[in-house]
């Protein structure tokens, strides 16, 4: 049994500013292609039905669920993953604040949260705690109870506004 | 908290954060394994059915499929799991690796498809045809115990898989002489753990060495290795378990599951790496469930609310399979039920039922219902006698003069502070002011409630506890500490973190014992060839058992280091020496002064110039230590919570939440606060939203995260935490352990708060979860018939 969706296609994907040629079937999820075919394993797969938010990436700068997207849909679009945000020795302001405020425990949901708020804080420089909770409601975290994530996002926002060293 | 500690108690940020926050963590599914095969399990659509025939011919011919394996195949490759500990009232059970004759719940795995990729494996799994003969499903405790109930496990005499009773003192006499006998009921619903990372494993059989490398996120690598070796007929030298970063576990990643054993057996059978990652539906349906209990208390009380005697009945719905002895969780609940209160006349009866649901296992605070039952009972007494619930707590609470306190079950409470945390919480919440606000609000038609819940949290189970409770197992832990020739410190322990953040606090325990900076210590965990055999992470044992053992091991290392240093300084002994931040210091006059000798110098001598070491001191700096904690250590806390219930919608909003907690000496306050917040969140999420739902035919109706609801930040409050630190005098450094009490307290306090809010409407919470629908149903039931008519 061979369905058309199983036949590999050659795709050219732009991820984190680099072009990747991959041969994958049309049915292959973007989350799986990023992880298996491009080797970017920071995008985590927690539910594969769009609820948990662990796989959140940016498509043309807007947050999206990689598990609800086929890689084949991404030709002509720019994909940004957690790997483009900071490195262990050069954390972004948000990542640094999450570290300082203990805004993560197991870390599985964290890349999705970082990607969500890297985008959000660019457009919303002075959010309230309530705003942050509202946006964060798209990302499940089973470990922290969210409180320290909220504190960290507010701290990062303050730093990005230059109000906090 | 001082005790002169310099490293223990530091707010040291977590060492693992930098990799995790940048997406550079390595979780199971991030491990590359070129050429690995992928599996997909065929699962039962029925709750209870005989397997008549499995037809895999079509699936076997599909693209990429390497093979389809059934319970019969696996029975040749693995041994069965027999659980028959010598526990009175526990029926022995035996499980095949995959079911052969019968499925026992919706989602039970009946066959395993192996293919070259996951998509192809799933395609083929859909084409495996299984012919079933459906049987009547047992979907509740009442059905399980009915005289004509279908047998869930055909080899047992009944569905009552475990039954224990105990009576201490004379509860019946206390009932006869009581001012009042107060009865209360508590039904906790079925939960599941929902780690964000589902289960999975990568088994890599090395045929030349006849060795299995098992990559798997697991809390207890060594016991898992023992299980794997035994079930595969291998020696423990032939299995290495490697646990990478783990995306949460909460008790779900302890047992060797049938799927994991299947994957390991197939890797060996096929001589190929084989991997499995379950999807979320599988995780919600068939990983492990927890917490489904029905409890009843009967309390004999005096006029002042003093508890004279307590009788408890616990029934547990254990699901279809025993991956743990069936008495495992429920009996601990019964053992610690009296918790913070002075009660000596006590009886319990614990019954565990097999049903056609997913098997139960421990979930963060396996004894979670305990505090709700005890504190709900206290509130029931207060309601019944029209007393202030705070006063009823006061007249019964253990105070310093009662300690050490032997509970009626023989468990010893010492260095706990339940009365102190109660008073801290009561003062912080200002109960009198709340009552005024509550009265005012009621006059405006708004329903506010205040709940209290005092928790005695059993944290670290020593071997003595297991022995006296008749549970097979040990509570000890093992560690090694090595100072390398360069002076850096490596250490290891048998724990395996699954997100708690062990790396900083455990390095602090080593650093404190040895006299170095925590930053210079690396703690290695999760690889059974590197770590010493330990009992792993479960309960709240990480700090006491893991941290305690590392601390003791580091003290041993320090003694050697100082002995060598003394000889290097031409001193007779190390009496006047200590080490701080890796520098040797000597007491001169009343001051500790650096002497220009560092750990690096000592290490160089120990490794590279051993001939000049003092007589009797061997070369190298390599230490190991095991430690068995006391029978049980306890932390304690009091939770307080203010809620408002909207009568029109049934919605509950939490206006304030605080906890006063005493978890003894804490290794790292950052990590402890995270555990406190996370545990409360998990308790509230469970009490308010989560629920595994089976219909009357045993179909699981909560198999997505849109159906099994986990709290988002919008449902959770800010947590205020008041600290109280009473060291345990019997553990290394006074450590007590923690991380589960928050769940216990949250479940009890929210139920009590909602009962308080709805008291004027005649509603008492006897059943969780507290969804808007369930609150509305309670209000409708309680409403006078005239109101029902107008509402309908």
Image: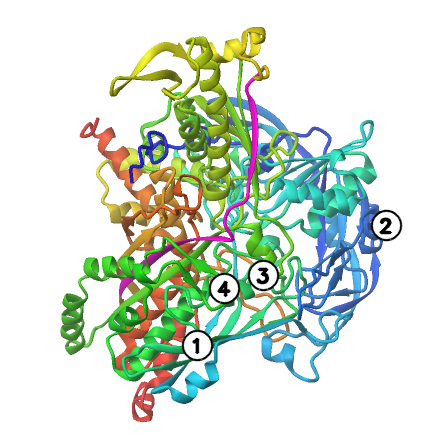
- In the image: residue B791, left or right of residue B86: left
Q: Element type at marker 2?
A: helix
- The reply to whether callout 3 and callout 1 are in contact (CB within 8 Å) is no
Q: Chain of mark 3?
A: B
Q: Which residue is mark 1?
A: B310
Residue B477 is marked as none
Q: Main secondary structure of the magenta part?
A: strand
Dot placed on the residue nearer the N-terminal end, 2 or 4: 2
Residue B469 is marked as 3
Which span of residues is magenta-colored? B620-642
The residue under the point 29% across, 63% down is B653
Q: Element type at marker 1?
A: strand
Classify residue A126 by image quadrant.
top left
Q: Quadrant of the C terminus of chain B?
A: bottom left
Q: Position of residue B397 (x, y in %)?
A: 32, 66
What is the spatial separation of the Cα atoms under label 3 and label 1, in whole angstroms? Answer: 20 Å
Dot placed on the residue nearer the N-terminal end, 1 or 2: 2
What is the spatial separation of the Cα atoms under label 2 and label 4, in whole angstroms? Answer: 45 Å
In the rendered image, residue B756 lying in the magenta stretch gets the answer: no
Dot placed on the residue nearer the N-terminal end, 3 or 4: 4
Of marks 1 and 4, the one in the foreground: 4
Q: Which residue is mark 4?
A: B410
Q: Element type at marker 4?
A: loop
Q: Which residue is mark 2?
A: B76
What is the spatial separation of the Cα atoms under label 3 and label 2, in whole angstroms? Answer: 35 Å
- Specify whether residue B645 is in view: no
């Amino acid at each position: 049994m061979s369905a058309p969706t199983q036949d590999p296609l050659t795709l050219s994907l732009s991820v984190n500013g680099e072009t990747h040629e991959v041969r994958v079937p049309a049915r292959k999820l973007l989350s799986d292609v990023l992880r298996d075919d491009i080797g970017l394993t920071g995008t985590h797969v927690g539910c594969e039905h769009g609820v948990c938010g662990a796989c959140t990436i940016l498509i043309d700068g807007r947050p999206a669920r990689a598990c609800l997207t086929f890689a084949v849909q991404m030709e002509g679009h720019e994909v940004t993953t957690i790997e483009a945000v900071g490195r262990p020795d050069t954390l972004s302001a948000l990542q640094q604040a999450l570290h300082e405020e203990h805004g993560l425990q197991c870390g599985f949901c964290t890349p999705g949260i970082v990607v969500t708020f890297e985008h959000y804080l660019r457009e919303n420089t002075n959010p309230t705690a309530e705003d942050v909770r509202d946006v964060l409601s798209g990302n499940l975290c089973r470990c922290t109870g969210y409180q320290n994530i909220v504190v960290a996002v507010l701290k990062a926002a303050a730093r990005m506004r230059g109000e906090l060293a | 908290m001082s005790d002169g500690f310099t490293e223990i108690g530091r707010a040291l940020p977590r060492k693992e954060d930098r990799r995790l926050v940048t997406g550079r963590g390595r979780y199971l599914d991030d491990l590359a394994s070129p050429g690995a095969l992928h599996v997909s399990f065929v699962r039962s659509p029925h709750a209870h059915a005989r397997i008549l025939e499995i037809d895999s011919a079509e699936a076997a011919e599909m693209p990429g499929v390497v093979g389809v394996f059934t319970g019969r195949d696996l029975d040749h490759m693995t041994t069965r799991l027999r659980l028959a500990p010598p526990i009175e009232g526990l029926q022995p059970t035996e499980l095949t690796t995959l079911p052969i004759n019968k499925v026992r719940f919706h989602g039970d795995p009946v066959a395993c498809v192996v293919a070259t990729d996951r998509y192809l494996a799933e395609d083929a799994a859909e084409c495996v045809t299984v012919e079933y003969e459906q049987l009547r499903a047992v979907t509740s405790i009442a059905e399980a115990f009915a005289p004509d109930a279908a047998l869930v496990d055909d080899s047992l005499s009944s569905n009552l898989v475990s039954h224990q009773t105990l009576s201490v003192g004379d509860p019946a006499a206390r009932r006869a002489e009581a001012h009042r006998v107060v009865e209360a009921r508590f039904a906790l619903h079925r939960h599941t753990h929902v780690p964000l990372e589902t289960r999975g494993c990568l088994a890599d059989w090395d045929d030349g060495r006849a060795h299995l490398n098992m990559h798997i996120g697991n809390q207890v690598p060594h016991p898992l290795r023992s299980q794997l070796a035994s079930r595969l007929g291998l020696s423990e030298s032939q299995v290495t378990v490697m646990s990478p970063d783990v995306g949460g576990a909460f008790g779900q990643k302890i047992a060797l599951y049938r799927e994991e054993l299947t994957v390991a057996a197939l890797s060996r059978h096929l001589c190929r790496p084989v991997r499995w990652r379950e999807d979320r539906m599988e995780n919600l349906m068939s990983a492990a469930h927890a917490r489904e209990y029905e409890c009843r208390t009967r309390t004999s009380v005096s006029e002042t609310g003093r508890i004279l005697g307590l009788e408890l009945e616990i029934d547990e719905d254990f699901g279809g399979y025993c991956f743990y002895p069936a008495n495992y969780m429920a009996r601990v609940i019964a053992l610690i039920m009296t918790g913070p209160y002075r009660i000596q006349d006590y009886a319990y009866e614990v019954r565990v039922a097999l049903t056609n649901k997913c098997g139960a296992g421990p979930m963060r605070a396996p004894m979670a219902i305990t505090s709700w039952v005890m504190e709900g009972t206290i509130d029931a007494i207060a309601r019944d006698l029209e007393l202030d619930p705070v006063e009823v707590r006061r007249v019964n609470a253990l105070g310093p003069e009662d300690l050490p306190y032997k509970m009626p079950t023989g468990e010893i409470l010492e260095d706990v502070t339940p009365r102190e945390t109660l008073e801290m919480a009561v003062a912080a919440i200002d109960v009198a002011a709340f009552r005024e606000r509550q009265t005012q609000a009621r006059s405006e038609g708004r329903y506010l409630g205040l709940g209290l819940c005092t928790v005695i949290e059993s944290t670290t189970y020593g071997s003595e506890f297991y022995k006296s409770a008749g549970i097979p197992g040990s509570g000890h832990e093992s560690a090694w500490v090595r100072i390398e020739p360069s002076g850096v410190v490596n250490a290891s322990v048998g724990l395996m973190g699954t997100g708690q953040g062990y790396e900083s606090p455990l390095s602090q325990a080593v650093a404190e014992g040895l006299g170095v900076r925590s930053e210079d210590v690396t703690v290695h965990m999760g690889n059974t060839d590197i770590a010493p055999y330990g009992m792993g992470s479960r309960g709240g044992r990480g700090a006491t058992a893991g941290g305690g053992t590392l601390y003791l091991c580091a003290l041993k290392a320090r003694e050697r280091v100082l002995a060598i240093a003394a000889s290097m300084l031409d001193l007779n002994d190390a009496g006047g020496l200590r080490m701080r931040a890796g520098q040797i210091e000597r007491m001169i006059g009343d001051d500790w002064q650096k002497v220009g000798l560092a750990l690096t110098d000592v290490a160089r001598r120990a490794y590279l110039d051993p001939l000049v070491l003092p007589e009797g001191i061997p070369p190298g700096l390599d230490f190991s230590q095991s430690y068995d904690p006391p029978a049980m250590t306890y932390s304690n806390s009091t939770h307080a919570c203010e809620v408002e219930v909207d009568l029109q919608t049934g919605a509950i909003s939490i206006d304030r939440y605080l906890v006063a907690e005493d978890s003894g000496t804490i290794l790292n306050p950052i990590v402890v606060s995270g555990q406190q917040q996370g545990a409360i969140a998990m308790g509230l999420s469970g009490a308010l939203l989560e629920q595994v739902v089976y219909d009357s035919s045993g179909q699981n109706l909560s198999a997505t995260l849109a159906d099994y609801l986990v709290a988002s930040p919008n449902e959770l409050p800010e947590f205020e935490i008041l600290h109280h630190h009473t060291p345990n005098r019997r553990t290394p450094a006074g450590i007590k352990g923690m991380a589960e009490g928050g769940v216990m307290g949250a479940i009890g306090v929210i139920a009590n708060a909602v009962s308080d809010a709805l008291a004027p409407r005649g509603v008492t919470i006897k059943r969780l979860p507290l969804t808007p629908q369930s609150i509305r149903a309670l209000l409708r039931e309680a409403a006078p018939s005239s109101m029902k008519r107008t509402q309908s």
